[in-house]
Image (tube, grey):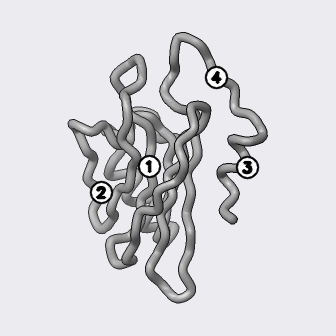
Amino acid sequence: WNVTSIKNKIFEFHTFLIDHNADIAINHHRNLAHPKKTLKIPNYKIHRQDGPLTINNKSRGGVLIAKNISTEDTPRPASSNIEILTIKTRTTPSLMVEAAYPPPPKVKYNKINSSDLDAIILP
């Protein structure tokens, strides 16, 4: 589902989540959760990892989880080449949800390497 200009598509996005009975959705679109303009989607909590904004003053995406599912953020080691947001559900059995994406563009592009990919895999 294309979330470009999501601010104009909140109703459509929410309908998509309901129609597909989605409890969890990962979105990597950079406009999902601007720290100063947090989007609100009924019955969902948006988890995001705030950090420096991109060169266009946009933040990264996030993880949407239905509000009826109890969760906890799980910190991960930082990397200069990849950002990882990990959420653990407090359900039985528990579920780990990870969103991984490149950090905001910099003057010098950092390539994602195998050790960055290894960091995504939980022990």
| Residue carrying label 2 | 41
Q: Amino acid at mark 2?
A: Ile
> Which residue corresponds to the image point at 46% horizontal and 41% vertical from the top-left?
3
Q: Amino acid at mark 1?
A: Gly
N-terminal label among 2 and 3: 2
| Residue carrying label 1 | 62
Q: Position of residue 104 (x, y in %)?
A: 48, 27
Residue at the extreme right of the image, as rendered: 114
Q: Amino acid at mark 4?
A: Asn
Q: Which mark identifies residue 72?
A: none
Q: Is residue 55 left or right of residue 39?
A: right
N-terminal label among 4 and 2: 2
| Of the pair 22 and 20, the residue shown nearer to us | 22
N-terminal label among 1 and 2: 2
- The CA distance from mark 1 to mark 3 is 21 Å
Q: Position of residue 37 (x, y in %)?
A: 23, 38
| Residue carrying label 3 | 118
The local crowd at label 4, few if under 14, some if 14 to 19, many if 20 or more residues have their Cα within 10 Å, is few
N-terminal label among 1 and 4: 1
